[in-house]
């Protein structure tokens, strides 16, 4: 009887440590663009238009709902051939859009991203792309190779940076 009690006590103490959940991660990239908010939003504010300015995405289509209306779901095909679905959670005209993963080959769990913009002076726009997320294997201290916090954080930071630089080039070329 004492042995069972001791084993139960060990399990109760060890369990929270063995199943500690991964810490939420955050990434943020920003850029200043020499174009008006309306001109930048005309490119980036189209939820299903991501392939027009984000090189890692080859194609996009609405699979549920109406484009730019919260609740709609887009299916993205990445350059590597994988697909992911993202759901639009919030859409503020010429200001921001917020989305999350809805299915497919996701890179993280509890992923919530926002692309926002605001005037940064005369005919200038500051664009910020930020996300919060947890790694896919959030329940373990030893995630599979390539799924650790740093790998996912680096991939998102790199992708966001590439996208914002492409958005800047397109918006500034259009504004000329």
Image: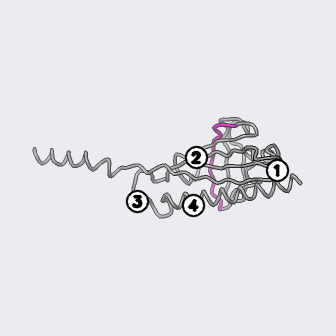
* 6 relative to 114 in the view: left or right: left
Give the residues drawn in magenta, as a range: 80-91
The image position of residue 12, as x and y in percent, is 25, 45
Tell us which disc is closer to us: 3 or 1: 1
> In the image as oriented, which residue stretches furthest toward the front?
121
Q: Whole-Å distance between the Cαs marked 4 and 2?
A: 22 Å
- Residue under label 3, please give it: 142
- Mark carried by residue 154: 4
Q: Whole-Å distance between the Cαs marked 3 and 4?
A: 18 Å
* 12 relative to 152 in the view: left or right: left
The N terminus sits in image quarter = top left
Q: Do the residues labelled 1 and 4 touch (CB within 8 Å)?
A: no
Q: Do the residues labelled 3 and 4 touch (CB within 8 Å)?
A: no
The C terminus sits in image quarter = bottom right
> Would you call the spot at circle 2 few (<14 residues within 10 Å), some (14-19), or many (20 or more)?
few
- Whichever of labels 3 and 2 marks the residue nearer the N terminus, that label is 2
Residue 16 within the magenta-colored segment of the rendering: no
- Residue under label 2, please give it: 103
The residue lying at 85 percent from left, 56 percent from top is 173
The residue lying at 77 percent from left, 56 percent from top is 168
Helix, strand or loop at mark 3: loop
- Residue under label 1, please give it: 35
- Whichever of labels 3 and 4 marks the residue nearer the N terminus, that label is 3
* 164 relative to 135 in the view: left or right: right
């Amino acid at each position: 009887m004492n042995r069972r009690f001791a084993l139960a006590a060990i399990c109760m103490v060890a369990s929270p440590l063995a199943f500690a959940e991964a810490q939420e991660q955050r990434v943020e990239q920003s850029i200043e663009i020499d174009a008006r908010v309306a001109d930048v939003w005309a490119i980036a504010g189209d939820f299903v238009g991501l392939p027009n300015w984000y090189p890692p995405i080859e194609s996009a289509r609405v699979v549920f709902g109406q484009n730019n209306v919260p609740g709609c779901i887009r299916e993205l095909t990445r350059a590597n051939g994988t697909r992911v679905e993202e759901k639009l959670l919030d859409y503020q005209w010429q200001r921001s859009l917020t989305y999350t993963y809805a299915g497919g080959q996701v890179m993280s769990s509890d992923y919530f991203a926002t692309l926002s913009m605001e005037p940064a002076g005369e005919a200038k726009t500051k664009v910020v792309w930020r996300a919060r997320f947890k790694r896919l294997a959030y329940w373990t201290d030893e995630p599979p190779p390539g799924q650790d916090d740093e790998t996912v954080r680096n991939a998102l930071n790199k992708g966001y940076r590439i996208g914002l630089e492409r958005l800047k080039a397109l918006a500034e070329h259009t504004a000329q």
